[in-house]
Amino acid sequence: MSETNVNIAINGAAGRMGRQLLSAVAERPGTVITAAVDAPGQACIGVDTSVLSGGEPTGVNTSDNVSSVLSAFDTIIDFTAPKVTLALLKSLRGSNKRIVIGTTGFNASQLDEISSAAQELPIVFAANYSIGVTVALSLLEQAAKALGDDYDVEISEAHHHHKVDAPSGTALAMGNAVADALSRDLAQCAVYGREGITGARDPKTIGFATVRAGDIIGEHTVLFAGNGERLEVTHKATDRMTFARGAVRAAHWLSSQSAGLYDMTHVLGIADDKPG
Ligand code: NAD
């Protein structure tokens, strides 16, 4: 192992994303798996991570307790569930660790806990680690500013039937990008689904529609509908490795950053603001 390697742990290593992350770390020069964690009782606990990734043996056995492997890694990549992520942040307080958070579905007070932890820890937090979605967020801001209030905005997303949160974190990030550009507050203007006699559409709203079906990895469309024309910005993920590679890129980038809350625009060097 070279001294320049970033030693990486995966939290949620047995999950759909965790397995891809193990492969993405293995394929990226300068990053190495030195710890893996999943929930107690999982078949992978105490076993080499290669049973999860299908790759070469790493000599790293998956643990069910992050505190017991703290000394083994510099940066931990977490794709789990909100409560698991927040417990992880508590375990990392007072350490010199860095964290890449991919988990979605946090409520407002949980988001505050992440912001507060970032005063002490370097954190990258993005609802979507694909390069395409990061670019789409910039395009949406530009489109919303140019089109203004004359265009109705509707956001639709589709994911696999295992997904537990709705709308997706990516759909909400897209909604926030549009709302900010239009000087609206998403918490006030979002409409999450419609049923019955809804009345005519309020032009200041941003609507969301959700599909959960089969093995869809992640599809998002933001529709700007005006009089006589429609503009659609669509992103389709066809392979989870796109998220995993982005998250590992973020982990590598984070190794030279100080405490703060960063997102993928910082990682790609296209951010127009300072970290939160
Ligand atoms: P998953 O259910 O397949 O995996 C979650 C893993 O976390 C499981 O292996 C589970 O056993 C593990 N886990 C549960 N409790 C734990 C604990 N206490 N300690 C350690 N591990 C624990 O889910 P998934 O499809 O891999 O998605 C995980 C999260 O990542 C979701 O919130 C999803 O929305 C999000 N996600 C984000 C992106 C992105 O680019 N940001 C992309 C895909 C998925």
Image: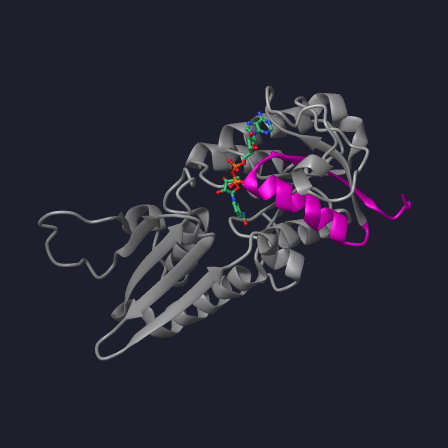
Image coordinates of residue 263 in percent, x first then y, are 59, 51
Q: Is residue 187 left or right of residue 7?
A: left
Q: Is residue 135 left or right of residue 259?
A: left
Quarter-of-image position of residue 224 = bottom left
* Towards the viewer: 25 or 172: 25
Image coordinates of residue 155 in percent, x first then y, are 34, 58
Q: Is residue 168 left or right of residue 99?
A: left
Quadrant in which ligand 1 is drawn = top right
Q: Is residue 62 above or below residue 223?
A: above
* Towards the viewer: 155 or 178: 155
Q: Residue placed at 33% from the left, 66% from the top?
A: 223
Magenta span has 108?
no
* Towards the viewer: 19 or 254: 19
The magenta segment is: 1-30
Q: Can residue 251 be seen? A: no
The scheme the figure's colours follow is: one colour
Q: Residue placed at 38% from the left, 74% from the top?
A: 146
Residue located farthest toward the bottom when viewing the structure as drawn: 228
Q: How many marks?
A: 0
Q: Residue placed at 46% from the left, 63% from the top?
A: 235
Q: Is residue 80 above or below residue 258?
A: above
* Towards the viewer: 265 or 182: 265
Image coordinates of residue 220 in percent, x first then y, are 41, 58
Magenta span has 3?
yes
Q: Is residue 174 above or below residue 42?
A: below
For the N terminus, the quadrant is top right
Q: Is residue 199 left or right of residue 269?
A: left
Q: Residue placed at 55% from the left, 41% from the top?
A: 16
Image coordinates of residue 57 in percent, x first then y, are 79, 38
Q: Can residue 104 be seen? A: yes
